[in-house]
Amino acid sequence: MPSPQELEGLSNSININPHLSAVLWQRDIRDFDSARTFFRPTYDQLHDPFLLKDMDRAVQRLKEAIDQNEKILIYGDYDVDGTTSVALVYSYLKTFYSDCSYYIPDRYAEGYGVSEAGILWAEENKFSLIIALDLGIKASDMVTLAKRKGIDFIICDHHLPGGDSKCRCRA
Ligand SMILES: [Mn+2]
């Protein structure tokens, strides 16, 4: 726990209420510079995207899809990190490539994760590449199903792979 003096020092240095300083303190933001990094981030603070495993293969496959005019589907969960990541990637891709769409599974009918209904919808609508955001790491059965239908997957998921690909208990 920070002392009242420490919280006051942080409050004074960035001109905020001590209650807010306490919240920042818990996140290890304890001086002017780290507060500036948190509140005013810049692109040069981002990690190198190629630190993500197989990013080179993902970029290659995406480039191929664009060169071949393939239909690309951005697929994500219906929760906060799912919908925001779909919105972010879809709106970016759409600025330079029109043959793309997005799919958010129905919360009640399909639940979390990649659904069979989603794969069938992608097949029916002739998508050949799915970019899965916030899901897919445990969906080896669905990826196999998609593969049989000629649909490739690029999976960008922050969850951990598990032994049980049927597990839906997550967020
Ligand atoms: Mn999520």
Image: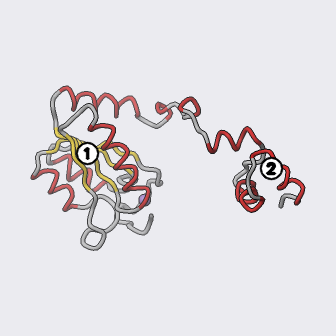
Judged left or right of residue 11, residue 166 is left
Q: Which residue is tagged 2?
A: 10
Residue 64 in the image: state x and y as whole percent. 23, 28
Q: Which residue is tagged 1?
A: 130
Name the residue located 23 percent from the left edge and 46 percent from the top edge. 73
Judged left or right of residue 85, residue 66 is left
Name the residue located 16 percent from the left edge and 51 percent from the top edge. 122
In-front residue for pair 46/7: 7
> Does 37 appear above or below 59?
below
| Three-letter residue code for mark 2 | Leu
Residue lying farthest to the top in this orientation: 67
In which quadrant of the rendered image does the N terminus lie? Answer: bottom right
Residue lying farthest to the front in this orientation: 15
Which of the four quarters of the rendered structure image does ligand 1 lie in? bottom left
Residue 44 in the image: state x and y as whole percent. 56, 29
Name the residue located 15 percent from the left edge and 31 percent from the top edge. 69
Whether residues under marks 2 and 1 lie with C-beta atoms below 8 angstroms apart, the answer is no
> Does 35 appear above or below 113?
above
Residue 134 in the image: state x and y as whole percent. 40, 53
Name the element at disc 1. Answer: strand
Q: Which colouring convention does the figure follow?
A: secondary structure
Q: Residues within 10 Å of mark 1 (few under 14, many from 20)?
A: many
Residue lying farthest to the bottom in this orientation: 108
Name the element at disc 2. Answer: helix
Judged left or right of residue 16, residue 129 is left
In the rendering, which numbered label is found on residue 141? Answer: none
Q: Residues within 10 Å of mark 2 (few under 14, many from 20)?
A: many
Residue 159 in the image: state x and y as whole percent. 46, 54
In terms of image quadrants, where is residue 89? top left
Q: CA distance from mark 2 to mark 1?
A: 46 Å
Foreground tag (2 vs 1): 2
Considering only order in the chain, which callout, 1 or 2, is on the residue closer to the N terminus? 2
